[in-house]
Structures are given as structure tokens and as C-alpha cells.
Image: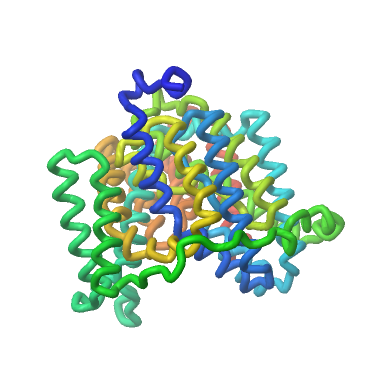
Amino acid sequence: MKEYFQFVSRNTNYRQETIAGFTTFLSMAYILVVNPIILSQSGMDQGAVFTATALSAIIGSLLIGVLANYPIGIAPSMGLNSFFTFSVCIGMNIPWQTALTGVFVSGILFVILSLLKIREKIINIIPKDLKHAIAAGIGFFIAFIGLKNGGLIVANEATFVSIGDLKSVTTLLTIFCFVLTIILLVRGVKGAIFYGMVVSTIIGMVFGIIETPKSIIGAVPSLTPTFGEVFLHLDQIFTPDMLAVIFTFLFVAFFDTAGALIAIASQAGLVKNNEIPNAGRALLADASSTVFGAVLGTSTTASMIESSSGIAAGGRTGFTSIVISACFAISLLFFPLLSVVTAGVTAPALIIVGALMAMEVKQIDWHQLEIAIPAFITILMMPLTYSVATGIALGFILYPILNIALGRGRKIHPIMYGLCVAFICYFIYLV
């Protein structure tokens, strides 16, 4: 087992990997609650979606751990589940069964692109400065999510955002646990983020901030309402609207996953010579998870950015993903306990991990404007648009344009030009 997961070369051990896996699971566990709530608004059965969410996370995390040896958790994407419900089902009035079939088809296309190593090739030809910008941008993005979840920043009609209510008990809990965690972190305590979450949960329950669960074990909801629906509606996807929906699922998921993989691999120190080892296997695992998830009854899955919390806790190999998968399997029985893993509990971890990932900015060549500006826009627009894919898109449009302006167009890989055009078309479609 140690040899298969390369414990020695990656300087890790079972204890470190287990803590990392559990840390990532706690950071991701909210998806088991939030995903069913969002998808149920499209008409899907909430209980069935819960079970499908857990099973897709089990399968995806297991695949990426075993096939690619990456410490990554896979689960339904938060951005794409919202697109599924509010844009496709409600906005376009498309039945959830048909929309889910669109997810299934996009997953099949993902698998084909992964087997042909097209996705891997695209990721590896991305200039190293943009890779660092993507990693840093995701750091700012998840820190922004953490600040929002912890109540430290709130919406404001006049200024868009402003500081939250610092007298709120939830916000005070976030601040206390943030300070506690960074103290543990700077003192070199391994698993500091995990311990911070545990302390946050206990304090929250003691002071009544977090509701103590009334039961421990609950029945696993049936998959019957959603399982296999995709096979009954394949004839309904050949319409202009559905083809556009499938393209959007494919496009956004492609670059969300690429962004997460680049960021996580960079954070874990796995990037070698501007290439990500086993990227093809990781992408294949991600794509296969989407196919399985659609059959079970959930929207597009993706490599979760929250995996960075486990890496910060010491996760370096696929054994971390095995632990994540096992935790999701156990969660099927212990669903009532997941109510204690609130957004406020994970907020300090996301802020800290965001800070750690933002350190990637030091790797960017800020002395050359044709590099600095696309990198800056990539970083800035991820949190401001609440979308990893949008930040990547804008950076990929600017980078080749500025290099052409300097007469360096021949140094840019042809695929980058293709992506530039594709992203421009993407924005035209959105408008």
C-alpha cells in the first residue's frame, strides 16, 4: 500500500493522509446537504439526490485516488448544480429528467476527450504563469467564500460588499476558530485545520450556536425516483436549447476541473516541468464520476477546490482520496450528524487555505505586462464573478492578444488561440 501510493517519495504516512482525508471530507460535507436542496427545486426527489450525491462522491474520489494517486475529493459542482436548477430547469423550462440526460451526455463527451488525452494536452500547454495565476485566483476565491460563509463580509446595496455583523455569535465563532487555527498552523501543528474544525464544532454546540443532532443514524433514502432516468430521455437532447446546455455543462466543467487540478497539484508540489503527472488519469476519473452521477441522479461532478484544505493538513497521495471516499460511505448512515458541519465551521479553513494558495502569486513574472495583466485579471475575476471558469476565460483571451501585439504570436501554442476564440464565443453565448 505504501509503495503503491508513494508514501516515501511524497514524505507522508497513514496518520497524515487519514487526517487530511477527514479534513477534506469535513470541508466538502456541506455538499450532502446543499446539493439536494438546490436540485430539489428543479422537481427532483431530495432524498434520492442525497444518496446520489454521496455515491457519486464515493465513486469519484475512489477513482481519482486509485487511478491517479491524487489527494482530491470529487463531488457535484456547486456552480453547475445551480446552473442545472435555476438556468436550465426553471429558466429554460426544461424537465429535470432531460437536463440530467444533458449532464450524462456531457459526461460521456468528457470521457472521450480524456481517453484521447485532449484535456490533458490542453492543461499541459497552459503557460506556467497562467497556471500560477489560476492557483492563486482560486485561493482568493475560496477565501472569499470562507469570509462570506463566516459572516465576515455581507452584501451591501451601496458598495456591493461590506464587513458583516461582528457581534453575531456565528461570526465571533468564525473569528475565534480562525485565530486558533492559524496559531496552531504557525506553531507547526500537523492537522491544525482539522483540529480547528473540531474545536469550532464543539464550541458551537456547547454555546447553542450549532444545533446538536437529535439522532445519530438514519435510513438511507432510496434512489428509485432518479436512478436510470437518463436512459429514458436520450431522444430529447437533440434540440438547439439542449445542445447549448450540453455545451455549457461541458465547457464550464472542463475549466473548473482544470483550474482545481492545477491549483491542487501546485499546492501539493506535484507539478514537474510545467506538467501535471497522471493528469490524464485524474481527468478520466473526474469525467467517469459525472457519468455515474448522472445515472444515479445528480448534476455534474468536479474535483473539489475544498480538497486544498486536506492538502494543507498534509495530504499528498491518493490514500487521502480513499479516506474521503470512506467518509462519504459512512455518511450515508450518519446523515443526522452532518448537520453540525455548517458553513461557519468550515469558513476559517477556507480562509486559511485561500491564503496558502494565494502565495502562488510570487511565482508569476510581474515585470512583464503581457504576463502580469492576464494573470491579474485571471486572479481578480474569479472572486468578483464567483466563477473559476470566468477568470480562466478572461486570462486566456488576453494572453494571446497581448503577445500578438508584441510580435510574439508564434511562441503561443495553437491550442491557446483555439481556446481564446472558444472563450470569446462562450461570452457571446452568455450575453
Q: Residue 112: x, y in percent? A: 70, 36
Q: Is residue 28 above or below residue 408?
A: below
Q: Residue 158: x, y in percent? A: 31, 81
Residue 401 visible somewhere in the drawing? no
- At x 20%, y 52%, the residue is 181
Which is more toward the observer, 15 or 347? Answer: 15
The residue lying furthest to the right in this view is 235
Q: How is the image coloured?
A: rainbow
Q: Residue 316: x, y in percent? A: 37, 31
Which quarter of the picture shows residue 245? bottom right
Q: Is residue 99 above or below residue 211?
A: above
Which is more toward the observer, 79 or 222? Answer: 222
Residue 390 visible somewhere in the drawing? yes
Direction from residue 368 to residue 74 in the image, left or right:
right
- At x 68%, y 46%, the residue is 291
- At x 30%, y 41%, the residue is 312
Which quarter of the picture shows residue 281? top right
Q: Is residue 121 above or below residue 303?
A: above
Quarter of the image with the C terminus in it:
bottom right
The count of marks equals 0
Q: Is residue 121 above or below residue 342?
A: above
Q: Residue 89: x, y in percent? A: 68, 70
Which is more toward the observer, 80 or 29? Answer: 29
- At x 21%, y 59%, the residue is 177
